[in-house]
Image (cartoon, helix red, strand yellow):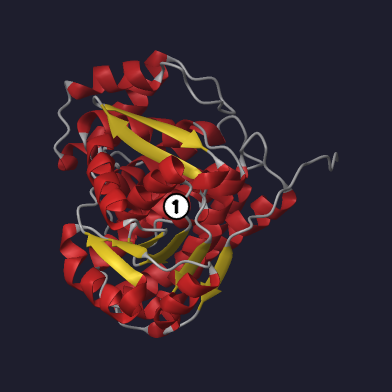
Amino acid sequence: MSRDFIYSGSPAHIVFGQGKSAAACEWVEKLGCTGALVLSTPNQKSDAEALAERLGSRAVGVFTGAVMHTPVDVTEKAMEVVRETKADCIVSLGGGSTTGLGKAIAYRTDLPQIVIPTTYAGSEVTPILGQTEGGRKTTVRHASILPEVVIYDPALTFGLPVGMSVTSGLNAMAHAVEALYARDRNPISTLMAAEGLRAFKTSLADIIARPWAPEARADALYGAWLCGTVLGTVGMALHHKICHTLGGTFDTPHADTHAIMLPHTAAYNAAAVPELLAPVADIFGGSVGGGLWDFARQIGSPLALKDLGLSEADLDRAADIATENPYWNPRPIDRESMRALLQDAWEGKRPA
């Protein structure tokens, strides 16, 4: 068996442990910064303001307008605040929406970032930015996008609603599943992907039973780090292309979309590379797509695109866009197959 591969480790500083978010000011200082702009979504405004208060004189402002899919017009509003406050670093508190905004700012300014995740999105450890403009979501990869410091504090996820924990976790799992068959996969990314999937297999079920259990929350955040890291290490394929299409064009909820599509895209590719997706079958049991669908149903995930407000008439347009400039994929992509795949996901069918 050939062992040819290329592996590049992430230069990001990972700080993991309960209560570690209290060290945010210390990391601002270590970065040599004196003016941090704190970011959040509107729902986490009070938490962002409290964080800015703890940063004291090192905080120069708070922007609480982060929203899903990182619209360019929101980034432009945040850039105005960056200029007005003369911020020299970004502290992002929250999930993928806030992290995305911080990365969008860093891409335009090269300002250093400290990310404090409160969900399991995993995007905080990638040099990838997805942003939306004119009804289309596009991605860009650049070294300046990768946050310099990520502080994982499980205590900040104790209050994450169970439903959001489930979809956020499945979103992260999608990164790992695609990493298993990525064209540029390597032994380290494969090990991390499988370990991340195992961490979520146990932790999500535990969170449903005991939402406040510190061990389950820590294990889920550990899984998020692993799955996010492989997202930043190797290229993504069909699954992420379809989810970007649905989110960018139809504004479907980011994590829910990933959760629903994962069993279907994994089943589609398992037909071509079953040996690469064997870890998924081993972890979740049965077939690749069926095992993931059964697990998603067991933990109470949404299963059908129609429940997200997507109409059946939207599926034709989605299939058209998904097959325009397709990502590399281990199984050839054609419009007819994508339309059928989307139909099954819209209806919520269990993959055969």
At 30% from the left and 42% from the top, the residue drawn is 70
Q: Nearer the viewer, residue 144 or 179?
A: 144
Q: What residue do we see at 55% from left, 60% from top?
A: 226
Residue 279, how many percent across, how many down?
61, 52
The image quadrant of residue 309 is top left
Secondary element at tag 1:
helix
Which residue matches tag 1? 123
Compare residues 277 and 41 and report the one nearer the observer. 41
* Residue 306 placement: quadrant: top left
Could you tell me which quadrant the N terminus lies in? top right
Query: How crowded is the residue under tag 1: few (<14 C-alpha within 10 Å), some, or many (20+)?
Result: many
Q: Quadrant of the C terminus?
A: top left
Taking 270 as reference, is 78 left or right? left
Residue type, mark 1 in image: Ser
Name the residue: 49% across, 74% down.
Answer: 29
Residue 291 appears in view = no
Q: Which residue occupies 42% across, 40% down?
A: 108
Q: Is residue 158 left or right of residue 138?
A: left
Question: In the rendering, at what x and y percent does residue 94 appear?
Answer: 31, 63
Number of numbered labels in the structure image: 1
The picture places residue 249, in percent across and down from the top left corner, at: 25, 28
